[in-house]
Amino acid sequence: MSDSHVQEAAAFPRGRWLQLWLGILCMVLIANLQYAWTLFVGPMSTAHGWKLGDIQWAFTIFIATETWITPFAGFVSDRLGPRRGPRLIILIGGVMVGLGWTINAHAATLGMLYTGAAVSGLGAGGIYAICVGNAVKWFPDRRGLAVGMTAAGFGAGAALTVVPIRWVIAEHGYSAAFLWFGIGQALILLVVAFVLHAPDEVLFAPRAIAQRLNQSARSFTSGEMLRSPVFWLMYFMFVLDAATGLMATAQLAPIAKDFGVANVPILFGATALSVALVVDNIMNGMARPFFGWVSDHLGREWTMGLAFSLGAFSYGLLAMAAHTPWAFVICAALIFFTWGEIFSLFPSLCSDTFGPKFATSNVALLYTAKGTSAFLVPFANVLQGATGDWATVFIVAASADVLVAGLAVFALRPLRLRVMSNP
């Protein structure tokens, strides 16, 4: 190892990798309600006679509350300090996740289902904010990779439990799945809360890395960030691209059913939908550290342009070539691989631009774009119902990806360079 590498490694406190892995574990534990949600929709509809569109509003409520609580959680954590703040939020979040899933297990009305979604969303959102905030603070030198690994826990974590959850639903009912997994996840979160914390002092990347990624040496408060046009351009881009991926997440089972492949056995007795759900979660998770790592070397905006262009291409493939079981699995996997990176690229870019001191609060404010985008998800059903197929939905999603890719390279990059050169 070169002297420069030794100096860079010595500049950071020991134990930061343990903190990163604890954050990843927390993300794994809160991933299921979003990424395994599609498994619960059909059984709930059958059990209660609820319309699919009505049930999907619970998904929207979960995403919205999970997202909109993050600025508050980030603010509280930053103000209480690096030790007390993260631990308190994780403790409260773990309790709420367990309570929310328990409510879902016993919900006999849509109102109860929506309440459970809101409670679990509030708990998951607080945990998400802390874990991502810790990653950008502990790893200014490898921010894309660290945030990507953390976000991968949320994206790929459900791959470990999709098959068990589906088995429990089939054998014991969806209520048992909600109850057992909810309580188990909550108990582990309560233990982790006593170990997780942020760095005791603000950490900065070595000068060469900071210059290459155009990282700010100054930390902007959330108020200052909200007055910046860079933030609002990033927010708009995040909304558009998050909406496409959330649509795919929420509608994957109905799409597979309409394509006639959902219940076709293709691998060791597993159906195309089961295989797709596992593979999609893995690809979604892999995208986050992979494109985060790429952005640490290529730059955030150029990586966005590349990834979102590939996403548009993937939607085209899904529309044209996904009507056989294995083709559906492959095309869906490509969509998730070219979508999951938004949860590593946008937080990294936000922290690069607005500094590390208030990163938990600032990144959380940007993350609310996901909640905003969730309100667009039910309109995929409206559009599909109006046209009779999914082709128009895929065209709209691909167009959004193309627009965001262009904005990243031709609008966001020059604007950020101009703002950063005149802080």
Image: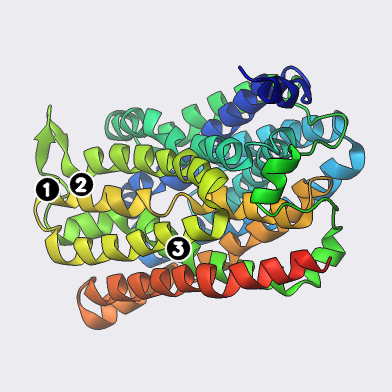
9 and 392: which one is in front? 9
Please provide percent x and percent y for residue 273. Answer: 22, 45
Say the numbered circle drawn on residue 400: none
What residue would you read off at disc 2? 329
60 and 280: which one is in front? 280
Q: Is residue 41 above or below residue 32?
A: below
Q: Residues within 10 Å of mark 2 (few under 14, many from 20)?
A: many
Specify the amino acid type for callout 1.
Pro
Label total for image? 3
Specify the amino acid type for callout 2.
Val
Q: Residue furthest bottom?
A: 386
Query: Please, what secondary structure does the residue beneath circle 1 have?
Result: helix
What residue would you read off at disc 3? 305
User: Disc 3 or 2, which lies upstream in sequence?
Assistant: 3
Q: How crowded is mark 3: few (under 14 residues within 10 Å), some or many (20 or more)?
A: many
Distance Cα–Cα, label 1 vs label 3: 30 Å
What residue would you read off at disc 1? 325
Q: How crowded is mark 1: few (under 14 residues within 10 Å), some or many (20 or more)?
A: many
Please provide percent x and percent y for residue 329. Answer: 20, 46
Asked if residue 298 can be seen in this view, the reply is yes
Asked if residue 105 can be seen in this view, the reply is no
